Image (cartoon, rainbow, N blue to C red):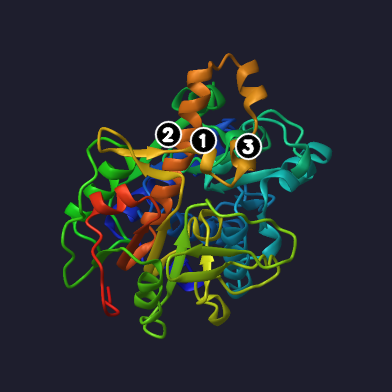
Amino acid sequence: MTPSSLLAPLDDDQQRLFDRIIAFTDRCLSTSQRPAVFLVQGAAGTGKSVLLSHLLIALTERARSAQVPALLAHGRIRMLVNHAEMWRRYRELAERTPVLRKAQVLRPTPFINAAARDEAKQADVALVDEAHLLLTRPDPYTRFHGSNQLADIIAASRVTIVVYDDAQVLRMRAQWTPKLLDEVLGSAAVERGELKRQHRMGASLAVRDWIDRTVSGQAPVEPPPAGDGDFGIRVFDDAGALYRAIRSHDGEGSARMLSTYDYPYTLDGGDHFIDEPGLHIRWDRYRPDEPEPWTTRADTVDEVGSVYTVQGLDLDWAGVLLGPSVALSSDGRLRMLPERYEDRAALNGVTALRARGWSDGDVEQARERILRDALLTLLTRARRGLGLYAHDQALAAALGARPRARVERL
């Protein structure tokens, strides 16, 4: 997702929700009703970030005009997101939009800590993207010492507009449930809205349903439905063939390889590689100061991105490696193996959850949920084509992988 795509025109559903949120914000600010929260829910690709971008600009324009001087007297409109790539995209949007300032775009912890020290740093309106990534316990590593980031943001804002997807929870330290969300919203004045129309994936409803059923384990694994002229989908028995098929689209749009976090990788400045039959390829290099999105940089076409690289972003074509943590169970359904998952940090935090009364079964279920949510995120990035390779041979067979003697484009 680029700054320009963040400003894609709103469709009718988005526009209606936009109007409701503006009216809610005006009403709550005029009555000094606090805390006030508007919760926007929607699956991946339904245009939540686009909606927030339009709201950020509109509210900032109103704050700097004479339209509502009493309501937005301080003009403190903040965009908060706990995701490095999306933070960079919003900062770039602010840099390119005259009415915005880059200082309006913050990571949650710096905002929370600054607001706790100085009331002037609090927000009139806080817009929160990817709220499902907010921490639900203290995290000294990121200097968050509270118990819940969303609760602290709500307390430091007159109105909070929250975007949330409960199918994209990726870490134990950000373990959200409907019950916890309701507890955090507490006594706030809450209004809710939902976005349902798919804006990203050009896939048919049959393909999207197949992805949901397969990843959730609701149905036995079977080959994907056939693609069509708008969206291609293929399963490869050779990872190198998948890579070549994705690489063949380079220059036609954004085409990149992705993988489940099942191969060793550390942020030590070095290169780390993924090895599968026919493929030796580098994990994406950690470049936090790079302004251009990983999905469109020329130097990343020979890399593999993780869920952290692409969450919230779009690709035209995605080749996804289903690594060792994704397997076929004895009943023919998709099985997740947390013990094979290399992102150990994502699965840490069990002690804090046990202190909240979680059983061993609850913890195991949460770990499997993280793996399923991460996989679903990877499989819903592509607009025009999706290629798959499964490390587990039984899974590959169930998916219908066939030997391919030539490069087959998606």
Please say if the residues under marks 2 and 3 sit with CB atoms less than 8 Å apart.
no
Residue 155 percent coordinates (x, y): 66, 32
Residue in the picture at 56% in, 46% down: 128
The residues bearing labels 2 and 3 have C-alpha atoms spaced at a distance of 23 Å
Please say if the residues under marks 3 and 1 sit with CB atoms less than 8 Å apart.
no
Q: Which residue is mark 3?
A: 135
Disc number at residue 191? 2
Mark positioned earlier in the residue sequence (3 or 1):
1
Amino acid at the residue labelled 2: Glu
Asked if one can make out residue 132 in the rendered structure from this viewpoint, the answer is no
Amino acid at the residue labelled 1: Val
Please say if the residues under marks 2 and 1 sit with CB atoms less than 8 Å apart.
yes
Q: Which residue is mark 1?
A: 37
Residue in the picture at 53% in, 44% down: 341
Please state which of residues 119 and 8 is positioned toward the viewer in this rendering: 8
Disc 3 element: loop
Amino acid at the residue labelled 3: Leu
Please state which of residues 215 and 175 is positioned toward the viewer in this rendering: 215
